[in-house]
Image: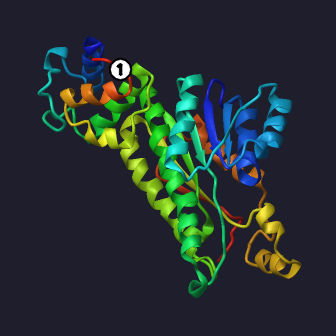
Amino acid sequence: MEEKLREVFARALDIPEEMVKDELEFNSIPQWDSIGHLGLIAALDEAFGIMIETEDVIDMSSFKKAKEILAKYGVQV
Amino acid sequence: MLLQDKIAWVTGASRGIGRATAVELASQGATVVLSATSEKSLQDTAEEIELKTGKAPMIMGYDVSDPVSVKQAFSLFQAHYKQLDILVNNAGVMMDALLPMVSEEQLNRTMAVNLNAVIYHMQYASRFMMRRKSGSIINVSSIMGRFGNVGQVVYAASKAAIIGATLSASKELAPFQIRVNAVAPGFIETDMTKQLSQQKFEEKLNTIKMGRAGTPEEVAKVILFLSCDWSSYVTGQVIGVDGGMIV
């Protein structure tokens, strides 16, 4: 499932999958700015069939954090 | 048909402008989701749509001003549909009071229904629209939100706030090809206006250059225009539908 999450991140942010690591953080690359973040959340909703809560949208500050947050929604990564 | 294969969500769809809008969008081929405080109140609208189109709309009864209920509604929607193309934020309340008589409850309730609900719905709807990089959001403001009126400090403030939210959201969502616009109706024949005395009604008509009240259907036509591709390059606009009313 981590691989799927990595794919979604790469596709949503339009970056190579190799760049998607635990250390990848919000605003650390031009593609993951606030507008990129909106697109990322929409892509995660669609890919995993969930509706991410507003607090979690705000908290999703890194790939590592995204894995923790998605676990709350029953997505095991 | 202008809205073939489109899915539209209309809040406050049980009567007035919301009902006329839901019927109009459905008549143009859209699959419509109707929302109001109670599912029972949506039965008439749903029956009218089914009669006209042969397609039963999805109906949802929930409090639009409660963020938990809104999220649940969108989660339920997601279980049935994978796309949302049009959102019409129409649900609203109007409680008149002169400034010294405005109660805290009235203030909070009006802002919760007229403003907070609009933002909650735009938040979730835009996430569906981002997936396809297209969509149209139409918020129902009011002429009072642009010009104000005696006894409507709270109502006018809430409707002015909708305009601010519309303009800002249009800027945020434009990169995703999502358009956000507002309509600002004037004096429209609805259940609310029917409560006016004959004298008050005529006083209102005297403020309208066209000399008559508008109909919910006339507002719905403008919302249809903003919903469909005829307005594909229109965003961040507030369109008055008021027959030349001067407040």
* Position above or below: B1 against A8: below
Residue B189 shows up from this direction: no
Tag 1: amino acid: Val
**Badge 1 is on which residue?**
A75
Check the picture and name the quadrant holding the C terminus of chain B: bottom right
Look at the numbered disc 1 and give the secondary structure of its residue: loop
Check the picture and name the quadrant holding the N terminus of chain B: top right
Residue A76 shows up from this direction: yes
Residue shown at the point (57%, 87%) measured from the top left: B100
Can you tell which quarter of the image residue B33 is in? top right
Residue B119 in the image, given as x and y percentages of width and height? 48, 51
* Chosen colour scheme: rainbow
Say left or right for B168 vs B49.
Answer: left
Residue shown at the point (69%, 71%) measured from the top left: B245
Of residues B101 and B203, which is closer to you in this image? B101
Residue shown at the point (80%, 61%) measured from the top left: B191
Residue A42 in the image, given as x and y percentages of width and height? 39, 30
Residue B167 in the image, given as x and y percentages of width and height? 44, 55
Residue shown at the point (66%, 71%) measured from the top left: B95
Task: For mark 1, name the chain.
Answer: A
Crowd tier of the residue under label 1, counting other residues whose Cα lies within 10 Å: few below 14, some 14–19, many 20 or above: some
Of residues A9 and B174, which is closer to you in this image? A9
